Image (tube, grey):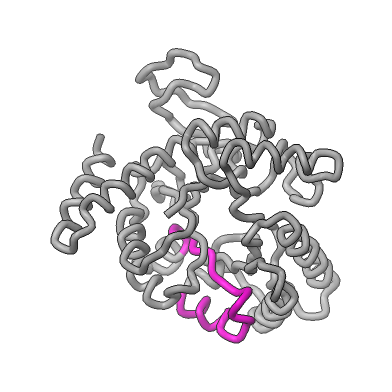
Amino acid sequence: MKLGFSTIGCPQWDWAEILGTAKDMGIDGLEIRGVEDEIDPMKITIFDAEHLEKTRTQLAQAGIEIAMIASSVVLGDPMGSRGGEQQMVQAKNQIDFASQNGIPFVRVLLTLDPNPVPADLPAAKERYEQLCSYAANKNVRVLVESCGLLSDSAKLAAFIADACPESRGVLWDIQHPFRNCAEKPKQTVANLGKEIRYVQVKDSVVDDNGEIEYRMMGLGDVPVYDAVKQLYQMGYEGYLTLLETGAAGPGCYLLPFPDLHGDAAGGNRKRRKNVNIAPYSGCILRLAVRIFLFCKEEASYEKAGRIFLSMRRD
């Protein structure tokens, strides 16, 4: 499996800081979800005509790829609506950009709200099938994220079933089926199987007010270890991408790490803003994956689980 992190967690970092951190942390790929406060991938400076070739060179020299364009395209508007038509144009532009630049995946959503809010599922399904047909022969897969009404993996499997097999797929965000549907990773993998082409990982707890509070990897209760176990058993070799959002509003974290500019914070826990904790969580996740591979014999699954749980306690 490969490890990535999303730029959504560091909206105020410049490209040099993003790329440098990814290289330092041994990240294999970057999920593009905004750079320097620009969320539209088609408007990000590093991808414009003036800077694109330099960006390609920097990525090649760092040994890092763009793993996915995580677009804001939503499919769930009513059929025939102006908004729905605009979303389709945006999606096709991003598919073309990905195809031209060797980016294998473009993410689309049912709704921007990850909770199971109302959406026009028949219209969304039709749009998704159109996008997959458009992406055919472009070496790009259009991935639907497991969120909103499609947190239910059985519904998600049915949603993509009639789309072009060569260009369809699922982005499994481990948290949403677990939170929205109380679905265990084993059930998600059973329903989606090889349609899982990309995986987003984050950890969290639900606070006393019923709100999700994101945590460092291993400090929440999302079944990350079990998800990795299921993926390994399935033979998954794609990305595990960290999607921590420490810079998003109240989502600040108590990080037991020195800050990113080298201050000797040691073990002091500081509340920080505008800090992407994904690379640090990535170190923990990479360790968890290695532990699992070390304990990969069937009889040792419980041993790997105990090691991972001890990491949570520490």
Magenta residues? 153-176
User: Along the horizontal axis of the image, is 12 left or right of 238?
Assistant: right
Name the residue: 44% across, 13% down.
Answer: 264
Residue 314 position within the rendered picture, expressed as x and y whole percent measured from the top left:
25, 34
Name the residue: 49% across, 14% down.
Answer: 263
State which quadrant residue 312 falls in: top left
User: Along the horizontal axis of the image, is 175 left or right of 114?
Assistant: left
Residue found at the far bottom of this picture: 162
Magenta span contains residue 6: no
State which quadrant residue 161 falls in: bottom right
Residue 250 position within the rendered picture, expressed as x and y whole percent measured from the top left:
55, 38
In the image, residue 224 sits, relative to residue 27, either above or below, namely below
User: Along the horizontal axis of the image, is 194 left or right of 10?
Assistant: left
In which quadrant is the N terminus drawn? bottom left
Residue 149 position within the rendered picture, expressed as x and y whole percent measured from the top left:
55, 72
Magenta span contains residue 168: yes
Residue 43 position within the rendered picture, expressed as x and y whole percent measured from the top left:
81, 47
Name the residue: 35% across, 20% down.
Answer: 267
The number of callouts visible is 0
In the image, residue 83 sits, relative to residue 266, either above or below, namely below
Given residues 157 and 23, the one toward you in this image is 23
Name the residue: 38% across, 17% down.
Answer: 266
Given residues 225 and 98, the one toward you in this image is 98
Residue found at the far left of this picture: 299
